[in-house]
Amino acid sequence: MKLVASDILLVWITLGAVYSFEYGEYERQPIFLTASVGGWVLLSCDIDFPETMPIPFKLYWNKNERTIFTYYKGVITSNEPYVGRLNLVDPPQPRYDTITVNLTSIRESDDGWFQCKVTFPNRTPNTMNRNGTWFHVSVNGGNLLEVPPINQTIMEGEEARLTCLPKDNAMKVIWYKDAVAVKDYQEMTHRTWTEEDGTLVIKPTQMEDNGEYECEVIHESGERQAARAFLDVQFKAKVLYAPPEIHLPFGRAAIIDCHFKANPPLTNLNWEKDGFLYDPYNIPGVFYKKNGSLLISKVDESHNGRYTCTPFNKLGTQGPSPPMNVVVQKPPVFVASPNNMYIRKLGEPIEIPCDARDGNNGHRPTVVWYKKDGTSLPMGRYEIKDGNLSIYNVQEEDRGLYVCSVTNKASTITAETELLVENIPSSAPYNLTGITSSHSVYLKWWAGRQRVNVNYSIWYKPVESKEWKTYYVPRSSYLDATIENLDPGREYEFMVLCRDERGEGLFSKAIKLWTKKSDGREFSITTMDSFMPPVGFPRNVTVTPTYKGFQVSWLPPEYGLENLKFYVVRCTQGVEDYPLVSHETRNISHLISDLPEGNQYGIQIIAVSYDDQQAISEKVSIKIPEYRKVQAISTGMIAGLALLVILFSAIYYVKSRWWRQKEKQAMYEKNGTSPKF
Ligand SMILES: *[C@@H]1O[C@H](CO)[C@@H](O)[C@H](O)[C@H]1NC(C)=O
Ligand SMILES: *[C@@H]1O[C@H](CO)[C@@H](O)[C@H](O)[C@H]1NC(C)=O
Ligand SMILES: *[C@@H]1O[C@H](CO)[C@@H](O)[C@H](O)[C@H]1NC(C)=O
Ligand SMILES: *[C@@H]1O[C@H](CO)[C@@H](O)[C@H](O)[C@H]1NC(C)=O
Ligand SMILES: *[C@@H]1O[C@H](CO)[C@@H](O)[C@H](O)[C@H]1NC(C)=O
Ligand SMILES: *[C@@H]1O[C@H](CO)[C@@H](O)[C@H](O)[C@H]1NC(C)=O
Ligand SMILES: *[C@@H]1O[C@H](CO)[C@@H](O)[C@H](O)[C@H]1NC(C)=O
Ligand SMILES: *[C@@H]1O[C@H](CO)[C@@H](O)[C@H](O)[C@H]1NC(C)=O
Ligand SMILES: *[C@@H]1O[C@H](CO)[C@@H](O)[C@H](O)[C@H]1NC(C)=O
């Protein structure tokens, strides 16, 4: 044995002498590095190519005279305890003559000498540097941890074991997943435990277990040390859910999504329509999106049908989706839409038309008006009738962009208009009202912008007649007048004309009134300025998160319940977006589900009367935190929900206070009186 060893030594020395002579072998200085448990360190080894020509080489890493890692022509081998812990990396400036490995998940036993050797197979001499390059790694710092966890890849359903061995088992080990304590994941508790030696066991694994795990070792002195590793849970591509019915807008572009999950990533995705392969490559106007969704550039009736999708990855598929019934729907169309702009003077009324028909059945869909800046329509001063928006007694804060939007199952169409409010009140008389008896009417009106020396006259006629009669108002009575000699039980139209010294005149809006029948029974008194919608607005809108979604509840309007056709629950994302949800119900609550996470939503309830007038509640804003963040704040479902409820209530409170404040201000500015609610 001794003899053999010395023989080899002799041969080496001889060869060494030859090489030293031929290539000028030199002794490399060892390289000293430090690292801490759980950390990583880069080991860069120079390859001394003969004649500086890159040729095939074999790389060896040795530790304690044992080969722990080899690399040859792209093939890596490694030995325990280094399997998966030594990885080739490309340094920032790759060089042909340097090869770098990243030693990761460093543990205590890594302390010591590492040797890197390069040989050139099938070549004589087969090495340039017999003794290789030596590295000394000192493992130090917070040494509570002996063996940190390492990255693992497993199949869903298998058992996962993540090591975390503290130096002595008096120390406490806590596991985190994606920075949240593992014990706080409700859905993991019944299949996860920590063994005595600190090992985290997950059995069986599920696809959601994918993530970064961190183990933290805590000494009783309070000293802590942590190490991290990734758990990669792989599974055959699977469909997560498929909506049973999808409505696509006729004539527009649309996407049919396949909601799948795949790890490793998707390699292929097949669509079937009515039982036959539906290959976008063979169908004009239909394309694959990168994520497998179907893009239809222009929807028509040929796209009606039952679709299924089947996703595949390297491991295969868990089968096709349930069928999705695609129904092509024509979008609503406007039959009357607003002008681009309207100008009104303070105090004047305005009516903005907007009317639409459903593209499929010609029914009149619900028209919703809102202000683009997210503020409410002026409560108590507006009404919406057959889609037309009327605002009475226009105030300065009414200026802005108004959006009329119409939604059916396929899509939403909107029209925008701008209202400008001139700061000067109109000089025309306004708010003309009247009380009739059988032969006369008593009229009252309000003066427009204050002007001196004006004369008023009343213009009136039976509705069906074309000829106006006039009545000059004596100056003594100023803002009221009684017109006599009318026929009983007849409808008349009245206007007030205000004329100044220069003869310039302005009419008030006309009103129609019925005189009473001669028996004294009252005919309906209508005044243009009675702006009570037949149904009041829904009150106290609250949004409560539940495990099924968001429960929106409200109180019925204060009056007009007998005129209520239904409520529309409207949910928009942000302030300007199209409604995501527009749902008709007669209940006083509605569950909204499937709202994408991480966004802000506005929810409003609209009371619609039988004659399609509407009264809109104030808007409640909710922000849906991302699922992960929800998990982070909830140590249990109950605690999480409680927190969310508080969050929503707070938002609601702020919002409703803000609205009231604004309303109050408006009232004060207008007439200096205290607001009544
Ligand atoms: C190899 O290199 C190491 C570190 O430089 C040195 O300690 C050792 O003596 C060398 N061995 C031989 C046989 O030259
Ligand atoms: C070495 O590996 C660790 C752990 O995976 C990683 O965080 C680090 O970025 C790697 N270093 C380099 C230079 O690639
Ligand atoms: C562990 O996995 C992560 C994520 O895939 C990767 O960034 C990291 O480099 C891996 N670490 C090791 C030691 O392989
Ligand atoms: C697929 O990608 C399209 C856009 O390219 C996107 O609109 C759609 O929501 C995506 N679908 C899914 C399921 O992620
Ligand atoms: C709505 O406005 C249009 C156009 O101004 C008008 O013809 C229609 O009569 C209005 N409808 C109602 C109910 O006022
Ligand atoms: C209209 O007139 C009535 C009575 O004449 C009055 O009570 C009401 O406040 C007036 N409305 C406006 C907006 O000026
Ligand atoms: C108002 O009417 C009176 C009597 O008819 C007339 O004398 C006066 O000039 C008129 N004033 C104006 C401003 O028209
Ligand atoms: C509705 O809201 C108002 C004001 O926020 C409050 O005073 C009232 O008590 C609420 N009503 C109910 C039944 O919750
Ligand atoms: C009203 O609510 C009840 C339960 O809250 C539900 O079963 C019912 O389907 C709802 N009705 C409508 C028309 O939404």
Image: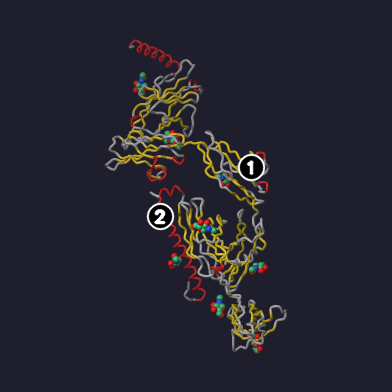
Name the image quarter holding residue 112.
top left
Query: Which of the marked residues, 1 or 2, is nearer the chain's N terminus?
Result: 1
Q: Nearer the viewer, mark 1 or mark 2?
A: 1
User: Which image quadrant shows ligand 2?
Assistant: top left
Residue 290 seen in the figure: no
Q: Which residue is mark 1?
A: 274
Check disc 2 and give the amino acid type. Leu
Side (left or right) of 289 relative to 141: right
What residue lies at 61% left-to-right and 54% top-to-bottom? 411
Q: Residues within 10 Å of mark 1 (few under 14, many from 20)?
A: few
The answer to which of 54 and 385 lies nearer the viewer is: 385
Side (left or right) of 440 relative to 617: right
Check disc 1 and give the amino acid type. Asp
The answer to which of 487 and 674 lies nearer the viewer is: 487
The answer to which of 552 and 643 lies nearer the viewer is: 552
Q: Which residue is mark 2?
A: 643
Q: Residues within 10 Å of mark 2 (few under 14, many from 20)?
A: some
Callout 1: SS: loop
